[in-house]
Amino acid sequence: LLPLSIAAFAMRNRFTRPGTLAAIIAIGYAAIRFPLDFLRLPETEPTRLGLTGGQWGSLVLVVAAGLFMQAGRSRKPSA
């Protein structure tokens, strides 16, 4: 998570719409978390439909962040 935090700090002034950086961080976190959960021992983490709770949460996070970013693109900027 340290590289993700450093990258977010470096990009903090690039986005004018509030929440965009948070959405990017959420997608980055989920992209890291999802494959790492496959390394867990099956006995330590229950699965549902072959995915752990963290992986399901990561999928929800990516969808929510993607919808947030898409909603910002489809809206016209206010004057």
Image (tube, grey):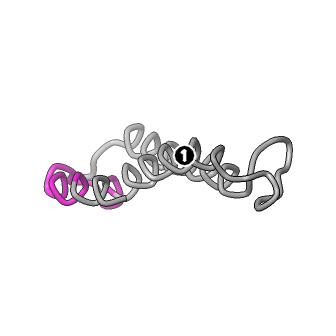
x, y (%) of residue 17?
Answer: 27, 54
- Looking at the picture, tell me which residue is in the foreground, 27 or 69: 27
Tell me which residue sits at (82%, 51%) in the image: 47
Q: Is residue 77 highlighted in magenta?
A: no
Lateral position of residue 7 relative to residue 76, left or right: left
x, y (%) of residue 27?
Answer: 45, 47
Tell me which residue sits at (27%, 52%) in the image: 78
| Quadrant location of the N terminus in the rendered image | bottom left
- Looking at the picture, tell me which residue is in the foreground, 52 or 66: 52
x, y (%) of residue 38?
Answer: 65, 44
Name the residue that disc number 1 marks.
Answer: 62
Q: Is residue 9 highlighted in magenta?
A: yes
Q: Which residues are magenta?
A: 7-21
Amino acid at dot 1:
Val
Q: Main secondary structure of the magenta part?
A: loop
Lateral position of residue 1 relative to residue 40, left or right: left
How many labels were placed on the picture? Answer: 1
- Looking at the picture, tell me which residue is in the foreground, 59 or 5: 5
* Disc 1 crowd, CA 10 A, few/some/many (<14, 14-19, 20+): some
When the figure is inspected, residue 76 is found, relative to residue 79, above or below; the finding is above
Q: Secondary structure at mark 1?
A: helix
Lateral position of residue 5 relative to residue 57, left or right: left
x, y (%) of residue 63?
Answer: 58, 44
Q: Using the rendered view, name the quadrant where residue 69 is placed.
A: top left
Q: Using the rendered view, name the quadrant where residue 44 is placed.
A: bottom right
- Looking at the picture, tell me which residue is in the foreground, 38 or 55: 38
